Structures are given as structure tokens and as C-alpha cells.
Amino acid sequence: MLLSSFQTTNVSDMAIYALGDRTPKIDPSAFVHPDATVIGDVTIGARSSIWPQAVLRGDYGHISIGSESSIQDGTVIHATAELSTVVGSRCVVGHIVHLEGCLIEDDVLVGSGSIVLHRVICESHSLVGANAVLTNGTVLPRFAMALGVPATIITGKVREGQFKEAVDLYVENAKNYARSLKRLD
């Protein structure tokens, strides 16, 4: 198993688990906070970050996180035996999000508290608004926003590169945490 750049602390304090022969693969430049949980068939790409209380549970199916993506506090990512969950590169997945059996392409922002369910596809440069619910089989087109419960899709509202600042902020924040985080108890 590749370990994250946080390996300067006691790796046994990190909640990273194999489940049978399903073992996480974490790029050495990724940051996994010690209070996050990563189980089973999970791949985390370069310079991505997994924040406190996030749970990535690859027990039944595969979970893949691309490079430079942030999975923020309290988010739950799961997969089914039939449906992988894929988050592309340069994505921002907000706090307390639920992703399951969906495809989040590159350069997508998934707002805090949202739910993205089975067979949903969020195409590149799209935005899932805070607390939105994308029901089974929804396709969120490029440059569109999904808002509400169930989500209403509004096209032409997102511009290319709109989330770059947030992506860069979390890449830098992860570097700072990897360097400076110290447990005090």
C-alpha cells in the first residue's frame, strides 16, 4: 500500500484499512487526515486530500479519487458491487456530502450537504448546489448547475476554471496540514 505524505506521524493512528484482499492505494503526495476513514478498494490520486470524518468505504465496489481533489469533512463515499463511485481530478466535494455509485467528472464542485445517487453523471465543469439531491440516473451537463430537492438543472451557469481557486486552496491546505498538524493528547 502506498502511504500518504502524512506518514511522518504514526501510520497506525490513521484509519486506513484493507478488507480481505481489497487494499487502498493512496498516492504518496495525497493527504489523508488521521480522523478520516479509508477502507478497501479505494484509490486516491496525487495531491488529493481527504479531511476529518470523511469515510471512503470500498467494501463492495471500487472508489476512485483523481488528482488534486478534496473530499471534505464528514463526506461519505460508498460504491455498490455493480456501480463504482468515481470522483475525477480537480474536484471540490464539500462538507457532509453523500456520493454513491456515481461519476463525478473532472473540474466539478459538489456543494456541502448534497446527495448524488446511483448512475448519476456530473459532467466536467458542472456544479451541484449545497443540499441538492441528484436522483438515480440524472445527467448534469457541462457548465450546468443542479439546485434543490430533487435537483433542478440550470444550464449555462458555470464557466470553465470557475473552481480553480478552491482546488488550489485545498492543495495548499493539505501541504500545510501534512507539514504542521500535531496531535496534542
Image: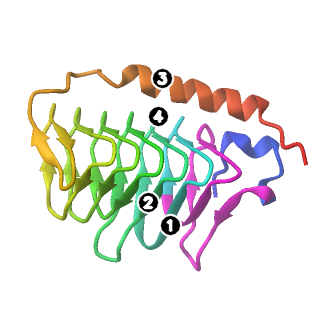
Q: Earlier in the sequence, mark 2 or mark 4?
A: 4
Q: Quadrant of residue 140?
A: top left
**Residue at the far left in the pictured view:** 155
Inspect the image, locate mark 3, and give the three-letter code of the amino acid beneath it.
Asp
**Residue at the far right in the pictured view:** 185
For disc 2, the marked residue is: 77
Q: Is residue 41 magenta?
A: yes
Q: Is residue 116 left or right of residue 151?
A: right
- Asked whether the residues under the numbered discs 3 and 1 touch, taking CB atoms below 8 Å apart as contact, a structural biologist would say no
Residue 108: % across, % down = 30, 37
Q: Quadrant of residue 40?
A: bottom right
User: Which marked residue is nearer to the observer: mark 3 or mark 4?
Assistant: 3
Q: Quick one: SS at disc 2?
A: strand
Identify whether 177 is placed above or below 31. Answer: above
For disc 1, the marked residue is: 57
Q: Quick one: SS at disc 4?
A: loop
**Distance between the alpha carbons at the discs numbered 3 and 1:** 26 Å
Number of the label disc, if any, that sits on residue 168? 3
Inspect the image, locate mark 2, and give the three-letter code of the amino acid beneath it.
Ile
**Distance between the alpha carbons at the discs numbered 2 and 3:** 22 Å
Q: Which residues are magenta?
A: 13-42
Label 2: how many Cα within 10 Å (few below 14, some 14–19, many 20+): many
Residue pictured at 63% horizontal, 52% vertical: 2
Inspect the image, locate mark 1, and give the three-letter code of the amino acid beneath it.
Arg
- Asked whether the residues under the numbered discs 3 and 4 touch, taking CB atoms below 8 Å apart as contact, a structural biologist would say no
Q: Quick one: SS at disc 3?
A: helix
Residue 7: % across, % down = 75, 45
Residue 145: % across, % down = 18, 37
